[in-house]
Each structure stands twice: as C-alpha cells, then as structure tokens.
Amino acid sequence: MHARYKSHDDATLSHMEDAMCSFHTLNNVFLLGRAGQKAKAKAYALGLQLVKKRNVGEGRNAET
C-alpha cells in the first residue's frame, strides 16, 4: 500500500524496505503450492483426455 503513495518520506521508504525484506525471507512458502513440470504435463494430458471423451459423448448423443 505504501508504494501507491504519491510521495514518500524516510518513514514510508523504511516501511517498504521492511516489507520487502520480510517477503524475501518468507517467500519460500509459495514454492510449496507450485506444480512442477511433470505435474503440469500430466494435468494437461488428463485434460486433453477428458475433452476428447466429452466430444465423443456429444457425438453419440447427436446421433441418437
């Protein structure tokens, strides 16, 4: 929020620097929820299979 200020003084700059240091100290928590390349590829392949099954099912419904 401090970065949105139109002007800054020593106090706001200090607050922003403290927040940035805290973020860089704790940002490893975001890596826990990050999917690796293998997981992304597997999810993509599964998604393609589901779309193909849906399209085949829609084709059968159209014929009957």
Image: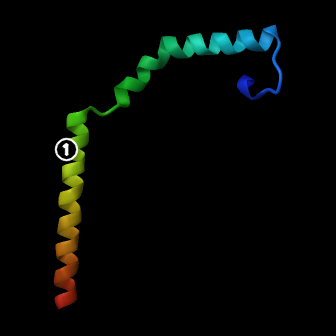
Q: How many other residues sit within 10 Å of disc 1, few (<14), some (14-19) or many (≥20)?
A: few
Q: Tally the numbered discs.
A: 1
Q: On the rendered image, what quadrant is the C terminus found in?
A: bottom left
Residue 34 percent coordinates (x, y):
35, 31
Residue 20 percent coordinates (x, y):
60, 15
Q: Nearer the viewer, residue 39 or 6?
A: 6
Q: Nearer the viewer, residue 33 or 38?
A: 38
Q: Nearer the viewer, residue 31 or 5?
A: 5
The answer to whether 2 appears left or right of 45 in the picture is: right
Going 35% across and 25% down the picture, which residue do you hit? 32
Above or below residue 50? Residue 45 is: above
Q: Quadrant of residue 55?
A: bottom left
Mark 1 sits on what residue? 42
Callout 1 secondary element: helix
Above or below residue 3? Residue 18 is: above
Going 18% across and 66% down the picture, which residue do you hit? 52
Going 22% across and 87% down the picture, which residue do you hit? 62
Going 17% across and 74% down the picture, which residue do you hit? 56
Q: Quadrant of residue 3?
A: top right
The answer to whether 25 appears left or right of 32 in the picture is: right
> How does the figure colour the protein chain or chains?
rainbow
Q: Quadrant of residue 19?
A: top right
Give the residue at the far bottom of this rendering.
Answer: 64
At label 1, which amino acid type do we have? Lys
The answer to whether 22 appears left or right of 60 in the picture is: right
Residue 23 percent coordinates (x, y):
54, 17
Q: On the rendered image, what quadrant is the N terminus found in?
A: top right
